[in-house]
Structures are given as structure tokens and as C-alpha cells.
Image (cartoon, rainbow, N blue to C red):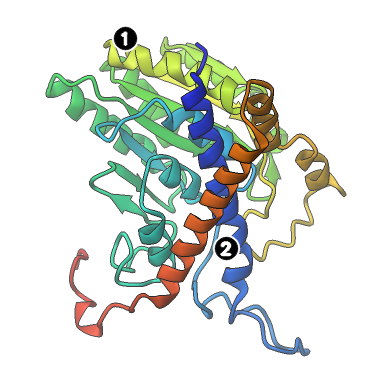
Amino acid sequence: MEPTKEQLLWMYEQMLVIRDFEETMVNVYLEGKLPPEIQEGLAFDIGSGLVPGEMHLAAGQEPVAVGSCVHLTDDDTITGTHRPHHFAIAKGISLNSLAAEMFGKVTGLGRGKGGHMHLFSVDKKFGCSGIIGAGMPQACGAALAAKKQGKDWVTVTFFGEGAANQGSFHESLNLAAIWNLPVIFICEDNKYAISVTREESTAIANNADRAIGYGIPGVRVENNDAVEVYDVVGEAVARGRQGKGPSLIEVSTDRYLGHFQGDAEAYRPENEVSTLRENDPIDRLQQQLLDSGMTEEEDSQIKERTKASVQEAYAFARESAYPDTSEATQHVFV
């Protein structure tokens, strides 16, 4: 399955937006969290600053999001992980609302009450969770609802390779197979479950091979490449829409930043990230587009447009108001 030029351009632009959004957050997140002068006894304060709480960024993992979401519509559902921004952006969620939610502002997706690990959008049928593996059972529920309504909607659930060792992974695959549900399970193998390598935690070399235990297709994408993801996910989405049931896909991808911001990353081999960046997936797709006719001027226009949209989102988040204290018990389960 080959993407059209329009789809390639869409994936490229979305990857640029995601990368800029994530790398901008690296510095914004630190504002107010470190004392002006580092002194003995003073430490990083995770609860302070413009963006309180933990922060998990996905720079380097853009191909998984864009290569998957290019096949989806607003009627299709996504469930994501604690590292969710690339999926949210590729699904079409407003950058302004996304940034505002991370800042805890009332203009955010959840009126500032969810934070970056608990994003949701009813319009875009997107949700995520800070609980490892929690999105997979929910994905089965959304797919079952679509099937009972006679719709050709699919659900895509993203999770890390560490979550493939959770009970929810096996239970959800089994249920989706038994009920022939239109779920595409996509495992992002970024090599580390926090700081533990997959070799230390997983008995099988490829999680995609586990599909055979449930009688469904399983495919591994070895390269962190948007076009390769496009091809494999496209076939799985088509199967789901045709009523042929679930699929399991594993993508080898790269996490350039720490598991969370503030992660010392002592578990990484020296120069690992710089080596990974030498084969950056955005650069690869850019070159493919230039080789197929995109001009340098068109490339510059895309980059200017994406940078402007990210700057606007962060400005919107900074300028938005915090929720009034009277809303503390509204829009929540009590």
C-alpha cells in the first residue's frame, strides 16, 4: 500500500508539528521547577512551574502516530498511553486545547483537570491514561459498540512494549479475537520500559509473534519509518473495516528524550541518542518528498506554518485563565 503525495505531505507536516511541540515543552516544563541558583539541598520541584506534574514526551516516535492516524477518521477511536501527545496531534486534536490542558488552564481539553496523561476529546474519539495497559480493554469496548451499531469504524489502541507483559494485553487480544472486533493493537517498542530493556523484561523477541496465540495477524515494523507504518497499519485498518477482526502490530521506534522530563537516563549507553538521531525519521521523509518533487520553498513554507501553530498554542496556554475554584467538584467523579 503506497501513500499518495498528499498523504506524505500530511504525515511530514504532522511530524514537524509533533517534534516542535514536544521539544518546546522540554524547556517550558522546566520553568519554575529549578531554583534560580542551584544550591546544596535544593532540588527539582515536580509540582511547581507552569506545567506541574510528570511529563512524558514522544520526540522520535512520530512515525507510529502519523503512519497510523493518516488512515483514520473522526468516527474511529484511539486509546493512548501516558506518552500521548503525538497520537493526539495526529488525530486532529486542537493544539491550543492540548497545550492549555497541560498548563492546567480552563481552556484545555478537560478544563485543566486532567493534565497531560489524561487527555480526552469526545469529538475526535480520543482518550489516554496514565495506567500501563489500561487503554486496551477500553479499545475493545469502543470496537464492540461500533460492531453492534453496524458501523465500519475501527479502534486503534497504542501501548508500549512494557505493557505487552500486562494481563490487560493478553485479555484484550483474546476478547478481540473471540468477538472478531475491529481493533488494531499497536505496540511502540522504544526499547525501554522506563529504564528496563525489553531483553531484561520480555521472554519473546518480537511481541508481534504473540498474535499467533490468538489466531490473528501479527506484523513487526523494523524501521522507525512513517511510510512503512502507513503500509502495515493501512492493511490492518482495511481488515477491521471489512469485518475481518483485530490485528497486532509492533513498531520499532526511538525515544530521544528521557522516560520523563528530569530522567537522568543513566541506563542508556553513551551516545545512544545522538546515534539514533543520525537516522531521524523526519529527515528521511523530507528527503523522500524532495526527491519526488517538493521544492525547497514548499518545505520552508511547511516548516514556517508548523512552527507558527506551535508558538500560537503555547501562547494561548500561557494567556488562558485557570479554572475557578468553584469548579473543583464539577466535571469529575466524586
Residue 263 vertical position relative to residue 304 in the rendered view, above or below: below
Q: Secondary structure at mark 1?
A: loop
Q: Would you call the spot at circle 1 few (<14 residues within 10 Å), some (14-19), or many (20 or more)?
A: some
The single residue placed furthest to the left in the displayed view is 149
Disc 2 secondary structure class: helix
Q: Residue 25 has which mark?
A: 2
Q: Quadrant of residue 111?
A: bottom left
The answer, for residue 302, to whether it is visible in the render is yes
- Amino acid at the residue labelled 2: Met
Dividing the picture into quadrants, the one containing residue 98 is bottom left
From the viewer's perspective, is 246 left or right of 143?
Answer: right
Residue 250, compared with residue 274, is above or below; it is: above
From the viewer's perspective, is 308 left or right of 241?
right
- At x 46%, y 29%, the residue is 68
Check if mark 1's residue and mark 2's residue have beta carbons within 8 Å. Answer: no
Quadrant in which the C terminus is drawn: bottom left
Of 121 and 303, nearer the camera is: 303
Q: Is residue 327 left or right of residue 293?
A: left
Q: Left of 12 or right of it: where is 6?
A: left
